[in-house]
Amino acid sequence: MRSTRVLALLPLALLLSLAGAPLARLMAEGAGTLSPAFLFDPYYRWRLLWSFTQALATCALALLFGLPIAWALARFDFPGRRWLMRLMMLPFVMPTLVAAMGVLALFGPEGVTGVMGQDTPWLLLYGNLFYNLPLLVRSAQEGFARLPASRIMAARTLGASPWRVFWRIELPGALPWVCSALCLVFLYCFSGFGLALILGGQRYATVEVEIYTLVAYELNLGDASALALTVLAITGLAALGYAWLERILARPLRGMALPRSAPTGWRQYALLALAMGLTAMLALAPLAAIAWRALWAGAAWQALADPEVWGALANTARFTALALAGACVFGLAHAFAMRRSVLLGTLAFLPYALSPICVAFGLLLLYPGLSASLVLLIGAYTLLAYPFIARGLAASLDAVPAHLPQAARTLGASPWRLTWRLLLPLAAPALRRGMAFAAATALGEFAVTLFLSRPEWMTLTTLIYQRLGRPGAMNQDSALVLSCLLMLLAMLAFVLIEWQREEARDAGGR
Amino acid sequence: MKFRRLCLALSLFGVALGAQADSLRVITHSSFEVSKPLLADFEKQTGIQVELIKAGDAGEMLNKLILTRANPIADVVFGLDNSLAGKAEEAGVIAPSTLKSDGRKARYSLPGGLVSTDYGYVTLVYDKAWFAKHNLPLPKSLADLTLPAYRDLLVVENPATSSPGQAFLFSTIHAMGEERAFAFWRKLRGNGVKVVKDWGIAYNTDFSHNGGGRPIVLSYATDPAAEVAFSKVKITESPVGTLPLPGAVYQQIEGAGLIQGGHERAAAEKFIAFLRSKPVQQDLQTQMWMYPVMQGTPLAPVFSFAKEPAAHQTPSAQEIRAKGQDWVKRWTQVVLK
């Protein structure tokens, strides 16, 4: 175990060189003007407060809508359950740009619903929910499913009503899972950038967007650094909480889980219908809206014949493959190193907690010669993608019962052989899922591509962004068609990697 | 284990990517477009390999240049305009160009060692169908926009984050004087002007022609032509028109320059000359929707839909350099906070 800690040097070097050092470099540039006075500026205070509020509100809404879905998925067996579980994963692999386009296709100008959500906080909250609801549902579902049947049975025998069982036994039992998901939801929403940039508008943008404005347009590095540090501190706390909860959750199961049963009675059917309705409304509607509007785009489909689009597709595939390879290397190293270490587990969140714009500008300052080099671009992609592999894999490795490696060692297996023949095969499903997430991250990445970009490296996301920035209906429609294409690609990556997974682990896999 | 083989293949593919040769590094704003064959011709004829780096909005690009001036990230810059020329000069990021004239004359020039390449106008653009449907006469002056009849009709870009937004602020100040201009902005705020982050959101999301709720948008004078060119069906009249009201027309002159401390001087000069060459001057019209700066360049036929405004209200680059930042700060106080 001690020897595997050495592996941490690899991801730590990446984190330091591509995230820590650039941020420090940028802050050093603005150090002269760094002061806590920004806390007294009512404008910045409002930004921080709003970021906080929208993250908390998303947590509350995710809890409200997510718990019924999770409970229904954990307790009921019904045709299409597997499909629902898989569909719930879709939002998570969707690029930010696609999600934002989807929300706008529903509630934006000429939206499918006819409701205008612009200039209200609801647009951003809905976008947040789209991404984060599945997170909570999957986690809570697992918590509910793992609860020992004996406890529930005992309560029922003693005459507790289903409500009482839920409140007194099931919810407290699943609480660690729910809380760990809430930590993540808060972390993603509080430090969110892409969605807030597109959906927040002038008033409801998050503090990350403010940092972007301060650095990119006003060159006010002092205030930007101060805000970035505040964000880092708050997200750091959330990440620490998550890593700590993960350690608790890694304990092996006790007792048999309650088997799922077919719903009976109108109440259970109503609950199931509610769960399906909520899933469709919150997790699938934006994607359906994009597909629907793209279907009617007609002539804009000719855009697919454009060699520019094919070039972008090739680049997207190339960068995704390279980033995926890098993410596997660093993800494996970090996963083996961070087992049962809260600190290293927290560090896996660093790529999300850091302000992307500060890092991007810091990179320019630190490595001017590499400003438009493939090494830096792929490095940045890898940095954002690898934690998905590291975290999933680490959780899965922690769940391997201790007696298995012990037995293998007794039989004379070398550490390498042990890893290759025992640990990796056991963790393979988690690795595959991590790879799906990592691939999706690289597919949809646009913040980095916007900053470290060269035209011949046009990817699908930058192409969509470029079309959105041009006048005329044709360009808007082709942006929509390209978003649809990107959505299909994300689904393909997801299906290719995730679909082959054995069903047996469906309830336990994360 | 399939995924292990996959990992191996992927990493081999990664190693197979080679290093890159020395070349001319050109930094541009993200709206820079030039036809690929033209660029390929230039590379073939001069033997210079061009490495294009797109660095976001023009203001954002200049900030990147200022931040990295000790160790520049490019050799030549395209896309700095008269709003930014002063700031660029003050920061010392531009090295004067010694480009020789080839006999053709440029209509406009830029200070601070920049070489002008194209120009255009930031102005108000309206949705013809909306005004016809609501039977509302077009505003005759900027003051009209503060009247109840025009409440909630206008969307503009934030001067702090968008070059056209900044241009409009400057032109109102140039036309009315600082105090009256900010009084006008205060009234405009009371009359429901909407402020958005950048041009793309204003034009493509909030403009009623594209499904939004605002029939007047702060945009460019060439939009009517672009709308015809990018229309889904062939049309003979543009669906949008310009409102070149006094105080709402800003002339933007864009140019290129050598970056202080950059390499490949000779190649950089050649690239600037390329931007002023006949084919590029012709090409940029329908690529970037700007007017060519070199005299004698024929206009693209579709530009018949975009009349050049007869007058404009543009402060000098010196004035912008001296007061521009304070104006933007004051605007943020008056309109946003």
Image: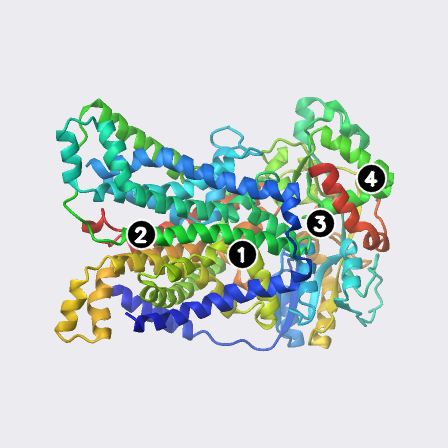
Which residue was labeled with disc 2? A495
In the picture, which quadrant includes the N terminus of chain A? bottom left
Q: How is the image coloured?
A: rainbow
Indicate the amino acid at tag 1.
Pro
- Residue B210, quarter of picture: top right
Q: Nearer the viewer, residue A459 or B196?
A: B196
State which chain disc 3 sits on: B
User: Is there one chain holding both mark 1 and mark 3?
Assistant: no
The x, y position of residue A352, in whole percent, is 47, 55
Residue B180, placed above or below residue A327: above
Dots 3, 2 in contact, CB < 8 A: no
Callout 2 crowding tier (Cα within 10 Å): few <14, some 14–19, many ≥20: some
- Mark 1, mark 3: which one is toward the viewer? 1
> On the same chain: label 2 and label 1?
yes
Decide: few, some or many residues near mark 4? Use Cα within 10 Å; few <14, some 14-19, many ≥20.
many
Residue linked to disc 3: B163
> Cα distance, mark 1 to mark 3?
23 Å
Q: Which residue is mark 4?
A: B247
Q: CA distance from mark 4 to mark 1?
A: 38 Å
Identify the residue under disc 1: A356
Left or right side of A306 for B40 = right
Label 4 sits on a secondary structure element that is loop
- Whether residue B300 sits left or right of residue B173 in the image: it is left
- Do callouts 4 and 3 mark residues in contact (Cβ within 8 Å)? no
| Residue A311 showing in the rendered view | yes
The percent position of residue B240, horizontal first and vertical second, equals: 68, 36
Foreground mark, 4 or 1, reads 1
